[in-house]
Amino acid sequence: MKIVSLNRMQRLLVLLFLVLSTWSCSQYSNKPMAVTFHNVNAKYNAIWQASRLDKELQKKQFSERKESYNSTLPIIIPLDSSFKQRNEKDSKELIRKASLVIDRHQNSHFIVDAYLLIGKGRLYQYDLKNAIETYKYVNSLEIRPEALLALYEIYLQQREFSAAEKIEEFISENPLNSNERKQFLLLKAYSFQLLNEPIKAVALLQEASKYLKKGDEKARISFIMGQLFSDNNQPSLALESYKTTLINKPSYDLQLQASLAIHQLEGNITALQDMIKDPKHEDNLSFIYVKIGQYYYAKKDYKKAKENWEKGGENNPNKGELYFQLGGLFAKQMKDYDLAAHYYDSAATYLSSNHPDYAKAQKLKKSWGTFSTLSNQINLQDSLLRISKLSPADLHSIFLKQQKDTSTKVTNAPVKIIPVFTRRPSSTDQQNFYFNNVQARIQGSIEFSNRWGNRTLEDFWNRRNKNVSLSLSSEVNRSTEKNLTKNVVSKDQAEENWLKAIPTSAIDKAKAAKIIEESLYKLGKLARLELAENELANAALKRLLTEFPSTGYEAEALYILYLSNEGATKSSYRSTLFERYPSSYFKTMILKLENGSLSENKEMQAQKKYEEAYERFKEKEFSSSFDNCLLIQQNYPGSKLEDKIVFLMALSKAGMHEITESKRLLEEFVISFPTSPLLKEATEMLKLMNK
């Protein structure tokens, strides 16, 4: 009994000791026992669980990435807002676990580690603002390379290069372990990739590869090196990098893409075509066709490139990129601008908003769409003016021919083939689903026919007062008779409407000519300033000046032609503009291009001259004021006062009662200075003049 009592007493004493120890282990105590207790709890409880979630999310981020192999892969996988939606629960749990260390273990040595994990959680949640603040706070507590590298990556992803450079300086001043060194080299290479300096990027990737083990990550970096070499016109080095990809245990997709790139660079078109026939590549035919298209494109066989790219567009997960390439093909090489507009429109639809070409595709969609509209407008008005010269009998013949051609097209229209979908054999469980059960569907069709009869496809097919016995053939006959009568009545009406669209009076012809004039001006301006298509700009603006020699757009047309040409032709347009429009702002713009920006001293001189010109205007010496402004334009082109100078010139011309010239200057002002504080006043003056 004494021994039992003694053992019980010992256990009670141990328990009492542990309780007292725990009470003394406050998270605000710096006693060794308290610190040890909270270190153990922080590291092997909250930190361990949060780190495990972080590793799982890292693996998911890499495995769930969507690569776009039609363009050069980004060295660093971009932050993806959709990843947040798919893994929101885990990222929240990661932040919650790491936050426990801060809430309950303030005196532990793992506070900084907890904040680093919280920062990672913010990144997974795509909460970049709070992630940046978290990492900045970490660096205020203790300089940690992990935090600096994370900040460096965020700034690069957001294209904030000046902020990224400052972080890079901090990283360079701190010692890095091998993993941190690898990450820094990859990020630095990524910065050069974003700045379009592929050779510098490749040099850093070669260094970073030394720290990578064989696997998907190293294979991916080798593949990117191949793409960068290929983009820089170094096919032999690109081929070597693609072959290195294959020996680094790549994923199936990466292996396929590397093999395709190797066959393309080697010019092995037979191997590419054999891959199409191989059943195992059935799900990746689109990628193979794209590579074959690129092969023919490099050979300048644009027709075959187009054929293969169009085949590659079928069931292609990256069809947005493919349509973007096709838009460029039709715009630059094949000169089919309507199709270029069509493909750029499709590219803008299918490209994701975080794709590097998304903004460019949206802009090209708008620009080429406008170009196509203007071009069609010109062609339509040209056709209408051309046929307006014909006799009524000839017009009637043309109408009848159009009607005949239309009916022939409808009659000979290809019959739509209903696609046949091959179903995979369904499992026993799937047989319970009605549409997977063939017998159930047949039985359902029979039961429907027995109850309702053969019904035509129409609204309210099941209404009760419907005459079920009504013959389908008689219904069709009556419908046909109605349509024939309707066609006889509408045929004359259609011809009358068609004739109304043709400009016959002098006023209507003048309106059509004005539409052509404005469309040619807009098309030429769009082609040069937005699409950088000098050939198209030249064609449109030369026609404008030839057919409309007194056009009000002549000054700007000459300026755009000056920009679109080289050598003697460029000088010719310059001389014509300077001679015919010495007071035009477009002359000033040419001088500004030739002389560059003004020095501070020149700006002060221009300011003084402008004040003198304004004094002349206030004293109603309008001619002197205008001449002074003209001298400022010639001697101080591109000054900060150029909007005020043009406006004062317009006011001076109005004071001289030269309303047409004043109006022209105001129109130039509105076009050239859309952000000027004087814009509203200029617009109001134009409205009064137009009245």
Image (tube, rainbow, N blue to C red):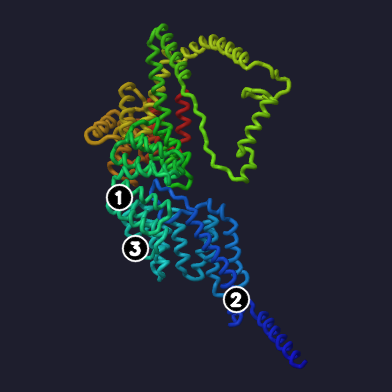
User: Closer to the camera, 328 or 501?
Assistant: 328
Q: Is residue 410 above or below residue 208?
A: above
406 with respect to 335 (left or right): right
When the figure is inspected, residue 350 is found, relative to residue 511, above or below; the finding is below
Residue type at the position of mark 1: Asn
Which label's residue is closer to the chain start, 2 or 3? 2
Which residue, given by chain and number where applicable, does mark 1 sit on? 232
User: Residue 381 location in percent, x, y?
Assistant: 40, 20
Question: Of 161 and 87, which appears nearest the observer?
Answer: 87
Q: Secondary structure at mark 3?
A: helix
Residue 552 figure quarter: top left
| Residue 367 vertical placement versus 473 (above, below) | below
Quadrant placement of the N terminus: bottom right
Q: Residue furthest left?
A: 568
Q: Quadrant of residue 24?
A: bottom right
Q: Can you tell which mark lies on residue 38? A: 2
Q: Which amino acid type is marked by label 2?
A: His
Q: Which residue is mark 3?
A: 207
Question: Marks 2/1: CA distance?
Answer: 56 Å
For residue 625, say whether it is visible.
Answer: no
Q: Is residue 301 above or below residue 45?
A: above
The label on residue 281 is none
